[in-house]
Every structure is written in structure tokens, then in C-alpha cells.
Image (cartoon, helix red, strand yellow):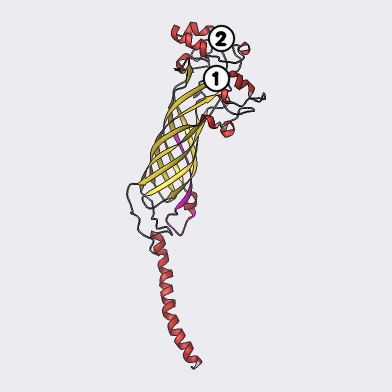
Amino acid sequence: MNTSIILMMTHKKTIPIIFFCSLLVLAMPSFAQKWNYDGLSDITGLAEINVSAGASSFLGDIGGNKGVGGSFVKDFNPKTVRPLFGASATLHLTKWAAVEAGFNFTQVNGADSLINNTGDQERWRYYRNLSFRSPIAEGYIGAVFYPTMYFEKKFELRSLVPFVGVGIGIMHYKPQTQLNGSWIDLQPLSLEGQGFPEYPDRLPYKLTSMYIPASVGVKYYVNNQTAISTGFTFRLTTTDYIDDVSTTYIDPSLFDLHLTPENAILAKQLYSRSLTPWKVKPDIEKASSSNNDSYFNFFLTLSFRLKGDDGYNDPR
């Protein structure tokens, strides 16, 4: 066959193919405006209801690990982990930013007896021999950011997105310790002289405090209705009394002067539980007041979208 004829025939077959491909390329941006590769649609303006479960741990003056006590996760002890449960609501302002409000219930605890005493710097905490628990109810509001979606230009929503969050909250706590099998509320006992005229700088502490939660995690959108998140939340509080210790020992005779007879009896039994009682004297350091208490939790969250697309198939 003549070469020119072959070229003409090939050219005639190629034109429709090129035309079709051109239409497909032109159409891709409109598809991208509605779908991503997993068939997920934009979440801007939509809300989610979330339920969470997790595990909390205390970071404060009581308990910890060997060596000098430290802040953040240095003193994390897995033996003190307790469950956390919560619920929240999220409103997505854009595909990369949201506001969230919620509440959680948990309990934190600590015990000097759980420290692995090697005879080093941790020994004084081990011999101090204090322990506590504190149930916590907290509510918060904050902002959540999805950094990869801020830079995403092709798709409206990726199925797997990392996130960071920060907010402000209010918490109610109640430190307790165990005596003869019963749990005793510690705040009314003023074990460090709070409210006593001999210690004018030590005011009775409130059982309600502000805190700042900071979170990091990853979220997986199962479909246009459901998502699963997991991550870590650290809380910086404005109190050093979640565990009821912060400063020094006091003279136990002051309890009889300033407390009811019933509370004075309890206070004299609980202000010191040292394994080396001959070393306990008034104004000897009981704990460091240089850092406020904190606590953190790992979480797993299940989210349900309130309205929006019901999840069509990817049109590719």
C-alpha cells in the first residue's frame, strides 16, 4: 500500500483518539473538584460527631521512673495507665481546618512505690511513699489543622491525613488517697498548710483548673460518612495539685489548730507516709513546685458525618 495512503489512514484514526484524550484531560479538573482517588468529597461546612476511647497517664510529682524526676514523658510509667472515654463534635470550616468541642472522663494516679529504686536520685521519692488517684472530668474547645490538605491542590479530600490540634479547656479533679481500705479526699485536709496563717502564701487550691490540650495524630476516612482517628494528646494544666503535693512538709501539730477533730486525725496520718519517718521535718521539701502537673492520653476516635454525600463510587 502507498505510504502516503497509510499515513493518511493512521492520521484519520489518530484524530479521534487525540480528541477523546483531550476531552478527558479537560474533564479531569472538574472530576477532581468533586472526587479524589478514593471517591471522597469535600468536607467544608460539614459536621461530625465523634466518640473516643483511650488510655491516660499522669505526669507530676508522685511516682515516675528512676533518676531525677522530669517533666513530659520521661516519668511515664505504664503501671499507672487508666482508661479514658469521651465525645465531641467537629465543624470543618475548610478542607484543612476545623473547630472542635468535647468532653472526656478519665482518672489519673501515681504511686512512689512503683518506682524502680536503684538507689540513685529516685530514692528519695521512693522512700517518700506517697500515692494518689484523681478522677477527672474535662471539657474543651479547640482548632484542628490538616497540614497536608492545606497544600493539596488536586483532590478535595485524601483518605489518610495527619492532623495537629490545640485548644483550651476546663477540668474538675479530686485527689484522693487510700487509708485502711477507704479512699480519702485530700483537698479538705490542707496537708501542706493551705489556708493556715502560718503559711500565708499557700492558699487553698481549687478543684477546677484550666488546661491547654495539644494533639497530634492521623485520620483515615473510611468513606464519606465514617472516619477513624488515632493519636496522642498532652495537657498542660494550671495547677500543681492534681496529686495534692507541691511544696514542703509542715508541723503536724498545726492540723489540730486549724482543722476539725475528724480531719485533723486523718491529716496527721496522711501528711507523711515516709519509709524513713525520722527524716521528715517541717519545711523539708515534699515535692517540687517548679512545674505544674500534666497528663496525656492515647486515643482512638470513631467519627460520623452528620450530612453530605453518601459516598458514590469513584467515577474513573
Label 1 environment density (alpha carbons within 10 Å; few <14, some 14–19, many ≥20): many
Amino acid at the residue labelled 2:
Asp
Residue 257 makes an appearance in the image: yes
Judging by the rendered image, the residue that carries numbered circle 2 is: 251
Q: Please indicate whether residue 68 sits to the left or right of residue 96 in the image.
A: right
Callout 2 environment at 10 Å: few (<14), some (14 to 19), or many (20+)? some
Q: Sequence-wise, which precedes: disc 1 or disc 2?
A: 1
Residue 173 percent across, percent down from the top left: 44, 25
Whole-percent x, y for residue 196 in the image = 50, 11
Mark 1–mark 2 CB contact (< 8 Å): no
Nearer the observer, disc 1 or disc 2?
1
Q: Quadrant of the C terminus?
A: bottom left
**Compared with residue 158, is residue 7 higher up or lower down, i.e. above or below?**
below
Q: Magenta segment: does it hold 261?
A: no
For the residue marked with disc 1, what is the amino acid?
Answer: Leu
Q: Secondary structure at mark 1?
A: loop
Q: Nearer the viewer, residue 264 or 132?
A: 132
Picture quadrant where residue 102 is located? top left
As for residue 159 lying within the magenta part, the answer is yes
The picture places residue 171, in percent across and down from the top left corner, at: 43, 29
Write down the residue under mark 1: 130
Question: Does the rendering let one see residue 196?
Answer: no
* x then y, percent, for residue 69: 61, 27
Residue 9 against residue 75 in the figure, above or below: below
In the rendered image, which quarter is residue 120 located in? Answer: top right
Kind of element beneath mark 2: loop
User: Residue at point 43% right, 73% down?
Assistant: 22
Q: Is residue 246 toward the left or the right of residue 85 in the image?
A: right
| Farthest-out residue, front | 181
Distance from disc 1 to disc 2, alpha carbons, whole Å, reads 18 Å
What segment is highlighted magenta in the picture? 151-168
